[in-house]
Amino acid sequence: MKEIKTAKITEAVIELVKRANFSLRRDVLSILSSAYRIEINKQAKKILKAILDNAAYAKKNNLAICQDTGFPIVFIEVGIDVKIKGDLKAAINKGIKEGYKKYSLRNSIIKDPLLRGKSQFYPPIIHIDIVGGSKVKIMFLPKGFGCENKSQLKMFKPTADIEEIKEFIVDVVKNAGPDACPPYFIGVGIGGTADYACIMAKQALLINVTKKNSKLEEDLLRQINKSGIGPMGLGGKITALAVKIKKYPTHIAGLPVSVNISCHALRGATVTL
Amino acid sequence: MKNFNTLKAGQEIFFSGSIYTARDQAHKRLAEAIKTGRRLPFELKGTIIYYCGPTKTPEGKIIGSCGPTTSSRMDEFTPLLLCSGLKGMIGKGGRSQEVRNAIKKHKAIYFVTYAGCGALLSRYVKKVKTIAYTDLGPEAICKLEVKDFPLIVAIDANGRSIYDEN
């Protein structure tokens, strides 16, 4: 059986922290570049240029793309044929803590949500899944909170019309308006339970944004972009750059729909060990 | 500072001078201090607050990534601060009607800057000094000396907002 030491996991997480915060995802860069080419509104074009310049400057100078280096979220898939020697969660925690410190990121995490108090670099939120095979895949998503704040969950009736659902998703984006750094990426989770729909909405943000959209994703994107919110909310044809949907079976009595909004700086990095 | 009153919503300017970072918890404390008549850690009259919590400063750099945070979270504290002499604010996104009215009443101004571009904006910061609430970490109040910092007027002294047209 393949064996992976936890020190190797920690090392990998430190590297992911750096990559995600300093270098914008290739698919995100590519879709932003296309948006810059397509946009005709002068101010919107200028803002998109600044966003691209910012990504280049951050990468070149080892600076965080955004000062909100996010809530560190780790999705890890562990192959059933891998033996992890040591405490996996502790190893991930250590990687986050050391990585954020090493690369001078922001200590945005408050130990107690009610008492608040001193902020620190960790803990991350860790989602562990057991999958087939003998590999370990780690996906890291530092999630900015300006956009996390605008995310919503709605429990629809099972008889709800698809148009109602679409309206809800579009309204969540309209409600975010200029506040959460548009142009956005929209992650949607449909089905499962209240909690699972929210996790799927977050996971949807891990999907390659240049991947061809489904008809529903395309419809939603078109409707969202009709809002004219535009980059920084100052108008333009591009309010969202992509809509990605994940679905799961659900209960006869319900239809959960969760929308997780990401700012234009959708960051992330993945490694397979 | 005096010519801020002639600026119009939508105009872009490049600002050079001092600005103070303050976000959620700092606002709560400032408001608390004003209400109880305690001395503020800096002179509010005529100053500009930047809604910003920078990253840690990397070695050899003046400041880390330092873009704006969502302004609307500060809305509940803003009218009181404007009443106490605050002249301008820099952030991202819309403001409440109350804030807008207070901006008009006190002839203040609200700017937005390039949101999500914290790395790029760090280039315009020439000096940083932490002046208060150091226990708040990234939310401490810092005095920043900036040069040619890009700003867009979002709500002008007449209460006109750039978001009205969109």
Image: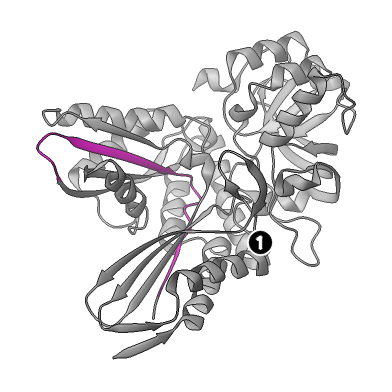
In front here: B78 or A57?
A: B78
Colouring chosen for the image of the structure: one colour
Where is residue A155? Give x, y as percent.
25, 32
Q: Residue at x 32, y 89 (%)?
A: A2
Question: Which residue is under mark 1?
Answer: A63
Where is residue A67? Give x, y as percent.
64, 51
Q: Residue at x 74, y 64 (%)?
A: B58
Q: Is residue A147 left or right of residue A77?
A: right
Q: Is residue A237 magenta?
A: no
Q: Is residue B92 left or right of residue B21?
A: left
Where is residue A241? Give x, y as percent.
39, 45
The answer to which quarter of the image holds residue A169 is top left
The span picked out in magenta is A250-271
Is residue A118 visible in the rendered image? The answer is yes
The answer to which quarter of the image holds residue B60 is bottom right
Q: Secondary structure at mark 1?
A: loop
Q: Residue at x 70, y 12 (%)?
A: B102
Vertical arrangement, residue B71 with respect to residue A211, above or below: above
Q: Residue at x 65, y 40 (%)?
A: B68
Quarter of the image that includes the N terminus of chain A:
bottom left
